[in-house]
Image (cartoon, rainbow, N blue to C red):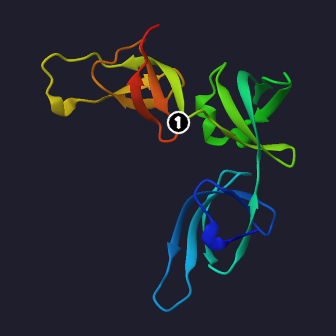
Amino acid sequence: MIDATQIRKGIIIKMADGQLFRVQEMQLITPGRWKAMVQTKLRSLKDNTVRDYRFRSEERVEQAFMDQVDMEFLYQSGDDYIFMNHTSYDQVSLTADVIGEAVKYLIPNVIFTIENFEGKPVSVVPPITVDLKVTHTEPFLKGATASASYKPATLENGMVVTVPPFIKEGDVVKVDTRDDKYLERVKNA
């Protein structure tokens, strides 16, 4: 158990009803002569819904500790996504509900972190960066001003990100999975 004032972004807490929530945002509010409170935005690991919750500063909260296992995404079979543990070679089948927003980064042979609580997978964390191929983008227009410096590009997973004008179809770009942003063009080996 931790004090509500020790809640930090990214930790997982177990509420009184037994549900697990990841802390998306946390703010300590100290309103003058009143007691401090902790305003949080929590994402449910069960159904991926987001809710705001305010804790009194003297409240105690149970922090849930996850077992983390790195697993490689292999393939999709119907509604199930198959992952393999590199050390034991065990395969695990997960649904889109467990994977959450990381489903858009499921590309074969990419390593993901599977978080387990009491032996059951509850969430999937993608790597911080992923290399994706550009499948469609507008060609570079010679003479275009610097104000039109970025253009939309559709990636192999269907995502659209803004990229610099020198990026063309077939290029591979590095994308930050935390905020879905273009980082750089991947150099050919």
| Residue depicted at 52% across the width and 41% down the height | 178
**The N terminus: image quadrant:** bottom right
Q: Position of residue 177 (x, y in %)?
A: 52, 36
Res. 124 image quadrant = top right
Badge 1 is on which residue?
177
| Depth check, front residue: 118 or 141 | 118
Is residue 37 rendered to the left or right of residue 142? Answer: right
Is residue 144 rendered to the left or right of residue 116? Answer: left
Is disc 1 surrounded by few (<14), some (14 to 19) or many (20+) residues within 10 Å? Answer: some
State whether residue 111 is above or below residue 28: above
Q: Position of residue 184 (x, y in %)?
A: 39, 25
Is residue 128 rendered to the left or right of residue 138? Answer: right
| Residue depicted at 77% across the width and 60% down the height | 19
| Residue depicted at 76% across the width and 48% down the height | 66
Q: Position of residue 81 (x, y in %)?
A: 74, 28
Which residue appears farthest toward the bottom when viewing the image?
33
Q: Position of residue 80 (x, y in %)?
A: 77, 29
State whether residue 108 is above or below residue 105: above
Q: Looking at the picture, which amino acid does disc 1 mark?
A: Thr
Q: Tag 1, which secondary structure?
A: loop
Is residue 72 rendered to the left or right of residue 140? Answer: right
- How many numbered discs? 1
Res. 14 image quadrant = bottom right
| Depth check, front residue: 49 or 18 | 18
| Residue depicted at 81% across the width and 24% down the height | 87
State whether residue 45 is above or below residue 129: below
| Depth check, front residue: 68 or 105 | 68
